Amino acid sequence: MKITSNTVAEVAYKIKLDNQQGEMIEFADEQSPRSMIFGYNRMIPGFETHMDGLQAGQSFEFSLNPEEAFGNYADNLIVDVPKKAFYVNGALKEDLLFLGNEIAMMDSRGNPLNGKVLEITGENVRMDFNHGLAGKNLYVAGQVISVREITEADLAPKGGCGSGCGCGSKDSSSEDSCCGGGGGGHHEHGGGGCGCSTEGSHEGHGHHHDHEYTEDCPSCGNPAEMRGKGHGDCQCG
């Protein structure tokens, strides 16, 4: 069977920045291949295009420009978010607000997205809602392990990205992301009037921890040394 729409492929792969010698972004080996669903817009466009027609046992190698991957960097996704959006149970989550921190939030439609803290002022937090790989070229190489028809179970919602970097959750590149699409959204933990909210209410949720990992991320497959560094859609930490 070949990869087409309505198929699921088990794939071993490596994704690097720019070229074969670039920084490793994500990988899945033959012992723990990643499932990729084709035909349902669950992957970045380049994977759908370059892997169409492949079958079990075939190897692949291709490069993706930003348009085929996570989009170009968009200045309009630099947004001033009112500090009120970071209140939980009436208290400001100051442990989240430090330069460079990536915070898990939701846009006005309830879609998850991550924003990086760029600047903190008296009333607002300037955040970058571009995907961490926006504007980047990617190099991809690997092998198709198996291909089968899709089932209802494959389409059931799952935690995490489900197919690593290849799934390409690109909601953050739309103009509806967080404050980019105007206000009116529901705030789970307080109203900032921008249509975004922080996800979760426990202490320290949404930012990376300085743990030392010895195993690959179970969600996205990032190697232990890459976990907690913001690579991969699950932002493993």
Image (cartoon, helix red, strand yellow):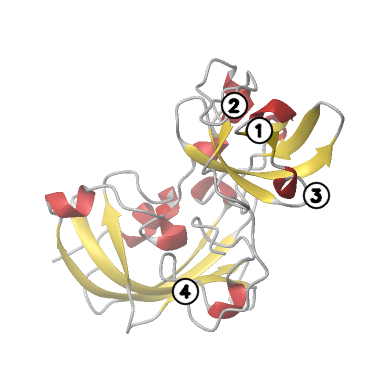
Which residue is denoted by mark 4 in the rendering?
A: 27
Task: Label 2: state its secondary structure.
Answer: loop
Q: Position of residue 228 (x, y in %)?
A: 61, 66
32 shown above or below 207: below
Q: Residue visible at 77% across and 34% down?
A: 125
151 shown above or below 41: below
Q: Estimate the spatial distance between the alpha carbons at disc 3 and disc 4, rounded to whole Å.
A: 29 Å
In front of the other: 48 or 167: 167
What residue type is disc 4 on? Phe
Q: Which mark is residue 99?
A: 3
In front of the other: 62 or 73: 73
Q: Residue visible at 33% across and 79% down?
A: 32
Mark 2 or 4, which is nearer the eye? 2
Q: Estimate the spatial distance between the alpha carbons at disc 2 and disc 3, rounded to whole Å.
A: 22 Å
Task: Label 3: state its secondary structure.
Answer: loop
Disc 2 crowd rating (10 Å Cα; few below 14, some 14-19, many 20+) is many
Q: Position of residue 38 (x, y in %)?
A: 27, 53
93 shown above or below 49: above
Q: Estimate the spatial distance between the alpha carbons at disc 1 and disc 4, rounded to whole Å.
A: 37 Å
**Disc on the earlier residue, 2 or 4:** 4
In front of the other: 54 or 91: 91
What residue type is disc 1 on? Tyr
Q: Estimate the spatial distance between the alpha carbons at disc 3 and disc 1, rounded to whole Å.
A: 18 Å
Task: Label 1: state its secondary structure.
Answer: strand
Disc 1 crowd rating (10 Å Cα; few below 14, some 14-19, many 20+) is many
Say whether residue 82 is visible.
no
> Mark 1 and mark 2 in contact (Cβ < 8 Å)?
yes
